[in-house]
Image (cartoon, rainbow, N blue to C red):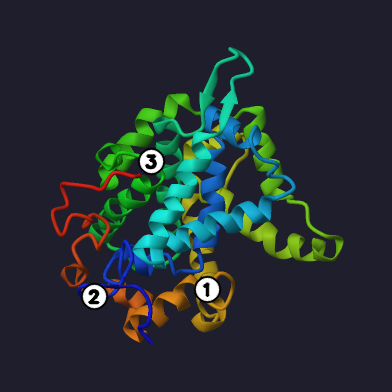
Amino acid sequence: MTDGPRTADGPDPGLFGPGSVTWQAHADPVMWIAGVRALYLQALHPRAVRGVTQNSDFRRDAWGRLLRTAGFVGTITYGTTEAAEQAGARVRRIHSHLGATDPVTGERYGVGEPDLLLWVHCAEIDSYLSVLRRSGTPVSDAQADRYIDENRQSARLVGLDPAAVPADRAQLAAYFEAVRPELAATDESHEVDDFLRRPPVPAFLVPARAVLWRHVASLAYDALPAYAHELYGRPAPGPATVTRRLTVTGNALRCIPDRLRWQLPPGHILGAMARLGPGSRPAPYKLRTPDAILDGPGRAQLRDGGDSTRWRTPG
């Protein structure tokens, strides 16, 4: 059960490890809804969304893009340390070759600029954490702060300096307050919005899109913060109504047996359990244990053997 890469202390737990909040949280099925919310939010940064629309045909390969993003998150969460570092290196390499042009000023800029990477990271972390908590996953305030802190590791992998990345809820809120004047609903934003509501699918999947995807996209959009609704110009139900819908949907999704859900490609969680043993199985009840039981910030900052004030440099 534990064959695979090993460290001096046993099988390699990867960058986070089973004792982290991230390990437990990322196994929750509402992460798919959270991921769509992140896309809606990310599209409100004009420079960031321009980098997407000018460098990829997301309309034709949207599902591939979503699966690649999910694969990256799965790899860095549940894969070995080497696999996570390699995944980060691939992302940094791709970003280094891509740029976008401001249609008004003619300015050419790289999609890997720190400000843009930071926006994408914070929009993802905020979406993951917000949807998880509102859907009933038992994440305490202390664990929420720990989750944000742990995921400075994922920010490092894409090329950010972790010291410049929010480390708790207060810093994350301050970041969104500071970046708010830069946000706007551009033509590209509405293009992403229209696509997410009605993504192209083969004819035989149109009924499923009408029933299943419409619910996912609608719930993800409704879960956005108030300023995002204001920018997009569409009203949303009250926060309490959205939270109830998220809770109902989350509870329904969690009724699907874990082993069935985890069989879906690419099987990161099952791979981690095979490497580390059945005790590494992620489960929401583990978040109900006292915070002290979890490993500090997991392995997220422990690339130096334990001193969380130093970080590895991507390379």
Q: Residue furthest top?
A: 105
Q: Are marks 3 and 1 in contact (CB under 8 Å)?
A: no
- Dot 1 corresponds to which residue? 267
Q: Quadrant of residue 232?
A: top right
The location of residue 167, given as percent across then percent down, is 26, 46
Earlier-in-chain disc, 3 versus 1:
3
- Dot 2 corresponds to which residue? 289
Earlier-in-chain disc, 1 versus 2:
1
Q: Is residue 218 visible?
A: no
Residue 201 as seen in the image, left or right of residue 22 = right
> Is 177 rendered above or below residue 123?
above
Q: Nearer the viewer, residue 23 or 39?
A: 23
Point out the image quarter for the C terminus: top left
Q: Amino acid at mark 2?
A: Thr
Per the model, the C-alpha gap separating discs 1 and 2 is: 26 Å
> Is 290 rendered above or below residue 144?
below
Q: Amino acid at mark 1?
A: Gly
Q: Quadrant of residue 78?
A: bottom left
The location of residue 114, given as percent across then percent down, is 39, 32
Q: Amino acid at mark 3?
A: Gly
Checking the image for residue 159, the label placed there is 3
